[in-house]
Amino acid sequence: MAKHHKINSWNTKLLDQLIEKVLSDVSYGDISLWLSVEHKLEISKTALHRFGKPIHEKFSGLIELGIPIKLIVSNRLAIEAVGIEKVEEELKGNLTKKIASMFVYLHD
């Protein structure tokens, strides 16, 4: 069985597909089956859980803000480089500005 540090060494495309499935709440059993059938990789549900839980926790705030999972996955390295908290703060600030500006016409 692969350890989670080995999962991190996979090519970017496969790793992105895995992270997208994790963030989309695909069951670890289904992910394990997908890896086995599609990629000939035997990874236990437990190993996937050890890998997936921190990924899900890290990006859950962005998902709650309504950021599409594909967008999170395609930008995950940049998000991690800047810092997840900073990205969330910036998005919340932008969202607040946009919401406030939506009602400006009511006061004219």
Image (tube, rainbow, N blue to C red):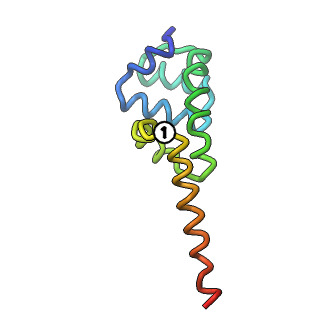
Q: Quadrant of the C terminus?
A: bottom right
Residue 1, given in percent of the width and then of the height, sits at: 51, 8
Q: Residue at x 55, y 30 (%)?
A: 55
Residue 39: x %, y % from top left: 41, 21
**Residue 45, image quadrant:** top right
Q: Taking 76 as reference, is 99 left or right? A: right
Q: Could you tell me which residue is drawn at 64 percent across and 87 percent down?
A: 107
Q: Nearer the viewer, residue 24 or 92?
A: 92
Q: How many numbered badges does the structure rendering display? A: 1
Q: Indicate the position of residue 29 as horizontal and vertical percent values.
A: 61, 23
Examine the rendered structure and indicate whether residue 92 appears above or below residue 99: above
Residue type marked 1: Gly
Please tell me which residue lies in front, 13 or 60: 60
Residue 5 vs 74, above or below: the answer is: above
Mark 1 surroundings: few (<14), some (14-19) or many (≥20) residues within 10 A = few
**Residue designated by label 1:** 83
As drawn, is 38 to the left or to the right of 99? Answer: left
